[in-house]
Amino acid sequence: MSSKSLQIHNEFAKIALSHEWWDRLSLEEQQDYVKQHRTRLRPTQHKTVDGIKYVKPRRASNQVLIVADVDKIDKLWKKQPVRGIYIGPDDPGDRGKRQGFQEFLKTTTEPIEAPEISVTDNYVGFTNGRHRFAVLRDMGKKQIAVCVSKSEYRKALEIIV
């Protein structure tokens, strides 16, 4: 291996250990990096945020795991046009689901599935995980990991990160 190749390899090894740097790159930037350095794209499948371990659900193969701002998601979720979908802090509905998740969080060391959301200019919708999100928001979390589709990745970075 030439000294130039070794230098590039060592730089990549340092960078690969820093998921935060990698996660800040857009999907296109990650792909360009991979082409330039002739290595494999390894999207992050898990993240730990504020002491909670998140994992990307298996069904979310076409999604990207990102760390997002809870207040920004909540503000846009309130604008969701379908009635009865938003779960407010004082919402009496589905208390059993929320209480079950709260108990689960107290007893588990396993990662939880990150909520799956869709992002538009006007609102955020949940494909899966709205009760988990509501519990984490009500616990005072400022950031959580969520999954967004690859096609909505840039929009998500603009609006909820």
Image (tube, helix red, strand yellow):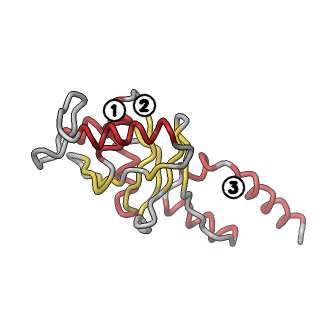
User: Crowdedness of circle 3 by 10 Å Cα count: few (<14), some, many (20+)?
Assistant: few
Q: Position of residue 32 (x, y in %)?
A: 58, 66
The residue to which callout 2 is attached is 142
| The N terminus: image quadrant | bottom right
Residue nearer the viewer, 139 or 76: 139
Q: Please, what is the three-letter code of the amino acid marked with disc 3? A: Ala
Q: Secondary structure at mark 2?
A: loop
Q: Residue furthest left?
A: 83
First along the sequence among labels 3 and 1: 3
Q: Please, what is the three-letter code of the amino acid marked with disc 2? A: Lys
Give me the residue at 69% from left, 72% from top.
Answer: 38
The residue to which callout 1 is attached is 71
Q: Position of residue 118 (x, y in %)?
A: 29, 55
| The C terminus: image quadrant | top left
Circle nearer the viewer, 2 or 3: 2
Q: Please, what is the three-letter code of the amino acid marked with disc 1? A: Asp
Do the CB atoms of the residues marked 1 and 2 lie less than 8 Å apart?
A: yes
Question: Taking 27 as reference, is 71 left or right?
Answer: left
Give the CA separation, mark 1 to mark 2.
7 Å
The residue to which callout 3 is attached is 16
User: Crowdedness of circle 1 by 10 Å Cα count: few (<14), some, many (20+)?
Assistant: some
First along the sequence among labels 1 and 2: 1
